[in-house]
């Protein structure tokens, strides 16, 4: 017995020793295991430390935003982190201190033992920094062997990890409705629907359906709606006055770009810098309106420069949020609290946009004038005449009779085209310095001058100046305008009578180059940039004129340019006359981006704490250091160079961002849920390898073709699953895509679907915004008296993308279903579920109108009431009506019929028109139609 006990003790000691050895090995392994900065350390720092020691502030001189900052000396003169030596690191001492006054984070919950262990091991291993996954280049991925299609392989592999199974395929009606709404935002033509529903449902039949949808002109309209949220597109300028803006050609450009499957890198480049491309086309100029969608403040008393800068910053923020999924706006006031972007890098990026010609003026110059077809032909004829009549390069006489600079036909034609298309080069009158009897009206809209006035324009380029063109209003006869250079008493270059008219007008004055008076001005020493002084004198005006409220001239803009070329050649007079007619023709214009000429170049300064009134150091255009790409150092420091950097295939963010956005549109949630933020504070991707796989294919295999990418997504079995969900199933939020998407339709899809099934839809494409029915009193425009004038005929039934969009009063029913206001870039719409939405689809007059026409369509098909209701349900869902739902709808019909038989007035109100349709049966059918169009399976994609 004693021996047995001794043996037991021996075995117990051995077992205990084994446990201790294993534990020591485990502890040793855990402490020496490589710590991942991005996965293990960065989350702790972001949650517990960065608010006091990051981009916003660096208390005690200690910042954890960048490694060089974290290892630098603090205010104590010593570094807080000593790589390789946790015991010598002040950071570790403070997070483990027992005294609450010494322990960090100060006055907050202390770090857990596990968090402290991770930080100690990280410092012991050298305090190595790491890059967030989204800031690393996209790499080609190895596809798991879990399914036939590549997307499904990634999804199935993740489902297996989560012990989940995919759902069964959806039936043909469900997938037909789903893919149609996703790709074209509306139902397809009947012959396409019938062909698929009558097919065997094979992969080939589905492929044919998908290809027909991708080829539909409706495709561009659907996807343009998504992009216009990012572009903050609207038909008005924004802010308080919110006046009209003719920018609809940009919307049409986006639709065409999607329909033509413009490669995404080209799509971005033209919007960022279309005006800087070699020999840009009209469409490429229009594309730059992407960044003229920023708001303009016309309210009296505002500072144009303040709101010009606000627009520039909006362009920077939009570029990053829309195309790179980054909250770069955080860096406007301080270094980014969480991501590797320094404060000065924001303003280096601002410098790319800070030299565009726009200046927040009411006219929104520069424009691309929307010349009509005949005017385009006339312009082309003028340019052809200039080029054909002026082949040789050499000296020629200018309009004033003196020798002018050397020129050639192409340069002359370009100057003429620039003036007629853009009204450039022009100087906005709001930039004038008022010296005497002059004022900038409202501080922001125009130069107003009285009698004996003097105003000054700085840094005017008079190189090759032979003509002064100006737009103005003056109804005072007898006035003389004088333009001098360098001082109010300087040499006269223009002196002309001012024509009087009750309308805005253009005038062209010759710039004098008289021998003697101007001797030496064009000798190469004084030619170029000068200050000019404009004075106005009118002896016919009474002495008391300047004491009254009236003004003699209202200036809009002035421009100095070469004279119309070809004087003395055959055809000169007729072409000059045609030029004048085109110049003075009233033509609306689309705001676009153009770069400033050299004499108007702006310097860019950092703003201390984001305040433009406290400028700091001057900066030059550059991309953030953390996203520099080797080999791109010599790109031009302008928007075109910036666009080339963005669309380089080594850029880590651009491809991932668009792939994530397309995925979200199809599946209801992005692979990274936070579309606006892929940074360290964004939600981690559920399928990072899949995101990178699709991003790689978009760039390297599909050559940036979005249609090819969308085709791959909708062809996957993952997309084609049924969306049924049992209460006891896993994956409640469908993060791992164990079933098909179930989301509410977008505001545009709901309206377009209802217009389609009711038979009302007008599929006319392009053109000015239209105004569907809206009650009086919603629009209040005291500044300009604008009213919502209901469009007539088919225009009121066009797709939602063409609805006129006023920022301060967006179309109510679209806003109710979460459409974006488009004041700023909107990276994603957060879906809501409110009773107001049901009230819209049941009671909004536009939807009641659709219900009436839907009921008429039901009656026109004939058959019994049961058949009419059954047919209409099939039009809505492509599915037969179940007996249970048929009974509910018939009960609703019978109940409504009894009510209307007893109330002729209610019948008339429901039917809405006094004709053969005005009867109780028709009114009851309208009620049923409205109810059916409000069903869950109609409002939802499921």
Image: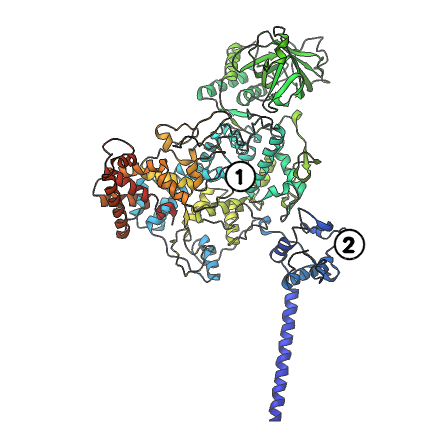
Mark 2 or mark 1, which has the lower sequence index?
Answer: 2
Could you tell me how many numbered marks the image carries?
2
Residue beneath the point at 71% across and 63% down: 98
**Alpha-carbon neighbours of circle 1 within 10 Å: few (<14), some, or many (≥20)?**
many
Relative vertical location of residue 75 with respect to residue 289 in this rendering, above or below = below
Give percent across and percent down for residue 896. Answer: 26, 43
Which residue bears the numbered disc 1? Answer: 825
Give percent across and percent down for residue 598. Answer: 65, 26
Relative vertical location of residue 226 with respect to residue 99 in this rendering, above or below = above
Residue beneath the point at 41% across and 36% down: 800
Which residue bears the numbered disc 2? Answer: 78
**Alpha-carbon neighbours of circle 2 within 10 Å: few (<14), some, or many (≥20)?**
few
Residue 666 relative to residue 48: left or right: left
SS of the residue under disc 2: loop
Numbered circle sitting on residue 83? none
| Residue 833 visible within the image | yes
SS of the residue under disc 1: loop
CB atoms at circles 2 and 1 under 8 Å apart?
A: no
Give percent across and percent down for residue 435. Answer: 68, 18
Relative vertical location of residue 298 with respect to residue 731 in this rendering, above or below = above
């Amino acid at each position: 017995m004693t021996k047995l006990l001794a043996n037991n003790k021996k075995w117990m000691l051995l077992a205990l020793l084994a446990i201790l050895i294993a534990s020591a090995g485990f502890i040793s392994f855990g402490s020496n295991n490589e710590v991942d900065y991005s996965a293990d350390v960065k989350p702790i720092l972001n949650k517990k430390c960065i608010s006091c020691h990051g981009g916003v502030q660096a208390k005690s001189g200690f910042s954890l935003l960048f490694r060089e900052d974290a290892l630098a000396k603090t205010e104590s003169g010593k570094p807080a982190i000593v790589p390789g030596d946790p015991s010598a690191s002040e950071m570790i001492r403070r997070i483990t201190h027992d005294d609450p006054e010494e322990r960090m984070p100060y006055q907050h919950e202390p770090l857990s033992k596990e968090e402290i262990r991770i930080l100690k091991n990280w410092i012991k291993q050298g305090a190595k920094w790491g890059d967030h996954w989204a800031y690393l280049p996209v790499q080609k991925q190895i596809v798991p062997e879990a399914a036939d299609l590549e997307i499904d392989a990634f999804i199935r592999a993740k489902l297996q990890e989560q012990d989940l199974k995919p759902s069964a395929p959806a039936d043909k009606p469900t997938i037909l409705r789903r893919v149609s709404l996703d790709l074209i935002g509306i139902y397809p033509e009947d012959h396409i629907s019938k062909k698929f529903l009558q097919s065997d449902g094979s992969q080939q039949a589905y492929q044919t359906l998908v290809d027909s949808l991708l080829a539909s002109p409706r495709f561009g309209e659907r996807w343009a709606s998504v992009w216009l949220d990012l572009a903050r597109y609207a038909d008005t300028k924004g802010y308080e006055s919110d006046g009209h803006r003719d920018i609809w050609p940009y919307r049409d450009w986006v639709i065409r770009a999607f329909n033509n499957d413009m490669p995404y890198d080209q799509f971005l480049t033209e919007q960022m810098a279309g005006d800087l491309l070699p020999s840009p086309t009209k469409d490429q100029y229009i594309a730059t309106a992407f960044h003229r969608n920023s708001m303009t403040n016309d309210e009296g008393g505002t500072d144009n420069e303040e709101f010009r800068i606000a627009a520039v910053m909006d362009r920077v923020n939009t570029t990053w949020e829309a195309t790179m999924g980054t909250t770069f706006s955080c860096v406007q006031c301080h270094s980014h609290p969480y991501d590797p972007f320094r404060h000065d890098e924001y303003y280096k990026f601002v410098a790319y946009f800070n030299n565009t010609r726009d200046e927040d003026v009411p006219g929104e110059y520069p424009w691309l004038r929307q010349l009509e077809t005949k005017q385009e032909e006339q312009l082309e004829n003028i340019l052809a005449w200039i080029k054909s009549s002026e082949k040789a390069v050499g000296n020629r006489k200018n309009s004033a009779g003196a020798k002018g600079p050397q020129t050639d036909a192409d340069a002359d034609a370009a100057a003429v085209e620039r003036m007629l298309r853009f009204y450039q080069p022009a100087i906005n009158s709001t930039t004038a310095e008022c010296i005497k009897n002059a004022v900038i009206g409202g501080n922001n809209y125009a130069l107003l001058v009285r009698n004996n006035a003097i105003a000054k324009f700085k840094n005017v380029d008079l190189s090759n100046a032979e003509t002064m063109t100006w737009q103005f209003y003056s109804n005072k006869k007898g006035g003389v305008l004088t333009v001098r250079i360098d001082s109010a008493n300087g040499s006269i270059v223009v002196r002309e009578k001012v024509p009087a008219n009750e309308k805005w007008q253009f005038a062209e004055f010759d710039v004098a180059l008289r021998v003697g008076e101007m001797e030496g001005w064009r000798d190469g020493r004084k030619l170029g940039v000068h200050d000019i002084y404009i004075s106005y004198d009118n002896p016919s005006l009474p002495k008391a004129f300047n004491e009254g409220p009236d003004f003699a001239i209202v200036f809009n803009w002035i421009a100095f340019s070469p004279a119309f070329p070809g004087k003395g050649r055959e055809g000169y007079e007729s072409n000059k006359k045609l030029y004048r007619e085109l110049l003075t023709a009233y033509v609306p214009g689309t705001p676009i981006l153009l770069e400033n000429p050299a004499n108007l170049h702006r310097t860019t300064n950092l703003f201390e704490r984001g305040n433009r009134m406290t400028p700091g150091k001057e900066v030059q255009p550059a991309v953030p250091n953390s996203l520099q790409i080797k080999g791109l150092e010599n790109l031009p420091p302008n928007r075109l160079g910036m666009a080339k950097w963005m669309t380089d295939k080594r850029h880590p963010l651009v491809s991932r961002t668009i792939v994530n956005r397309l995925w979200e549109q199809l599946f209801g949630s992005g692979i990274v849920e936070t579309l606006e933020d892929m940074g360290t504070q964004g939600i981690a991707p559920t399928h990072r390898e899949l995101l990178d796989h699709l991003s790689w294919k978009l760039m390297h295999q599909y050559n940036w073709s979005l249609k090819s990418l969308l085709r791959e997504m909708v062809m996957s079995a993952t997309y084609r699953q049924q969306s049924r969900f049992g209460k006891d199933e896993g994956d409640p939020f469908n993060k791992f895509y164990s079933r098909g998407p179930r989301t509410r339709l977008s505001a545009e899809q709901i309206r377009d679907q209802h217009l389609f099934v009711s038979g009302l839809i007008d599929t006319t494409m392009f053109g000015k915004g239209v105004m569907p029915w809206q009650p009086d009193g919603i629009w209040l425009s005291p500044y300009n008296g604008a009213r919502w004038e209901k469009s007539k005929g088919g225009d009121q039934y066009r797709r939602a993308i063409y609805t006129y969009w006023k920022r301060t009063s967006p179309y109510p029913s679209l806003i109710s279903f979460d459409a974006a206001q488009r004041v700023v870039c909107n990276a994603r719409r957060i879906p809501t579920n409110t009773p107001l939405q049901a009230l819209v689809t049941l009671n909004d007059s536009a939807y009641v109108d659709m219900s009436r026409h839907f009921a008429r369509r039901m009656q026109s098909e004939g058959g019994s009431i049961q058949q009419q209701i059954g047919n209409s349900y099939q039009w809505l869902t492509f599915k037969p009506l179940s007996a249970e739902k048929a009974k509910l709808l018939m009960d609703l019909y019978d109940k409504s019929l009894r009510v209307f038989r007893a109330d002729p007035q209610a019948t008339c109100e429901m039917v809405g028109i006094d004709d053969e349709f005005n009867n109780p049966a028709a009114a009851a059918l309208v009620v049923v139609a409205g109810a059916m169009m409000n069903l869950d399976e109609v409002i939802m994609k499921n």
